[in-house]
Image: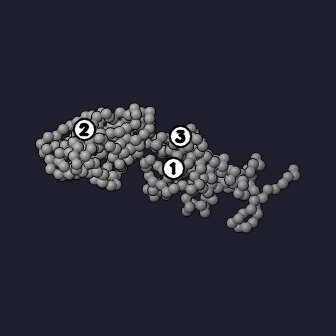
């Protein structure tokens, strides 16, 4: 029966070759996926160093974004030299394997347009070691050892947020609590954080002492306190709520002070800022100074 013979160009050997078909006359089309961004549901043309792929529900695409926590250096990954995934070929294997479709699950196409069309039709969930059919907004891929697959998962609670006081701050002749210029934390609605404030300061007048407290979004609840060593012989354990303030007694003579405050902050429906506050407990025409490098360290619990 008459028909046409299809040919493909062999770029390596600079010759045209007849295209192979199977026993049913079907032709195999091969495509090479050069870059992750070529895949249809991935939009990451120019990722920043250390970014991870995160599912974006608004665009239904995997996009590059900063990780909350985890491995940020590709060199820290393990198993890179293992030829145990059907979706990739080691550089050393290319000459012998030739990216064979039946072995490695990839195809090769002559022609840029045909190749790009085939690649765009591939989605991340199509890969054999990925099971992420319905990712939620901001989900990431996490390796699941039980199934030996990458699965969709919410970003785990991250490492601590650290805020360093970058300059000295002074209060003089005032008992009105004021927000510290640096020691504060932005919270989303309904988040829960464990917050610690470590403070170094100086009382120019020992009788001024310290008064401390918090400002916070409407609807937030705070349970906080400090183990405060005072006058060389007493240890006071104090449990307070968000509306309370606390007096911390300093040395009778001008001298340095140091104290640490711990708070469990449960935000309500209003996003906003939790800010550590301080003032003189007794107004004195003298400086109460909080030193630079005092810090706030916060851990997100939920």
Taking 102 as reference, is 230 left or right? left
Q: Which residue is mark 3?
A: 137
Residue at the spot 29% in from the left edge and 41% down from the top edge: 176
- Residue 246 is marked as 2
Please tell me how crowded label 1 is: few (under 14), some (14-19), or many (20+) other residues with Cα within 10 Å: some
Residue at the spot 26% in from the left edge and 48% down from the top edge: 172
Q: Nearer the viewer, mark 3 or mark 2?
A: 2
Q: Compared with residue 200, is residue 212 higher up or lower down, i.e. above or below? A: above
- Residue 119 is marked as none
Residue most toward the right?
Answer: 2
CA distance for labels 3 and 2: 42 Å
CA distance for labels 1 and 2: 41 Å
Please tell me how crowded label 3 is: few (under 14), some (14-19), or many (20+) other residues with Cα within 10 Å: some
- On the question of residue 119 being in view, the answer is yes
Residue at the spot 54% in from the left edge and 44% down from the top edge: 55
Q: N-terminal of the two: label 1 or label 3?
A: 1
**Number of numbered labels in the structure image:** 3
Residue most toward the left?
Answer: 233
Q: Compared with residue 252, is residue 9 higher up or lower down, i.e. above or below? A: below
- On the question of residue 258 being in view, the answer is no
Q: N-terminal of the two: label 3 or label 2?
A: 3
Q: Position of residue 128 (x, y in %)?
A: 57, 45
Q: Position of residue 28 (x, y in %)?
A: 71, 51
Q: N-terminal of the two: label 1 or label 2?
A: 1
Q: Which residue is mark 1?
A: 65
Q: Position of residue 40 (x, y in %)?
A: 63, 48
Secondary structure of residue under mark 1 = strand
Circles 3 and 2, Cβ within 8 Å, touching? The answer is no
């Amino acid at each position: 029966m008459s028909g046409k013979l299809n040919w493909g160009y062999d770029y390596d050997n600079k010759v045209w070759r007849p295209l192979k078909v199977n026993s049913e006359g079907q032709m195999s089309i091969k495509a090479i996926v050069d870059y992750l961004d070529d895949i249809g549901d991935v939009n990451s043309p120019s990722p920043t160093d250390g970014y991870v792929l995160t599912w974006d529900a608004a665009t239904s695409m995997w996009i590059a974004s900063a990780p909350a926590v985890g491995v940020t250096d590709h060199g820290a990954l393990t198993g890179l030299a293992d030829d145990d995934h059907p979706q990739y070929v080691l550089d050393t294997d290319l000459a012998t394997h030739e990216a064979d479709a039946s072995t490695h699950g990839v195809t090769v196409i002559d022609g840029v347009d045909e190749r790009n069309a085939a690649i765009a039709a591939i989605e991340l969930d199509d890969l054999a070691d990925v099971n992420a059919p319905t990712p939620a907004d901001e989900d990431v891929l996490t390796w699941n050892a039980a199934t030996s697959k990458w699965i969709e998962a919410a970003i785990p609670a991250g490492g601590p947020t650290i805020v360093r006081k970058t300059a000295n701050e002074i209060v003089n002749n005032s008992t009105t609590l004021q927000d510290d210029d640096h020691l504060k934390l932005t919270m989303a609605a309904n988040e829960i954080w464990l917050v610690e404030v470590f403070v170094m300061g100086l009382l120019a007048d020992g009788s001024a002492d310290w008064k401390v407290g918090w400002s916070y979004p409407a609807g937030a609840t705070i349970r906080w306190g400090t183990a405060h060593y005072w006058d060389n012989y007493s240890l006071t354990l104090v449990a307070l709520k968000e509306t309370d303030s606390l007096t911390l007694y300093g040395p009778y003579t001008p001298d340095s002070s140091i104290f640490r405050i711990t708070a469990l902050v449960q935000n309500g429906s209003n996003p906003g800022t939790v800010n550590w506050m301080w003032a003189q407990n007794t107004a004195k025409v003298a400086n109460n100074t909080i030193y630079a490098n005092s810090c706030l360290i916060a851990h997100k619990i939920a």
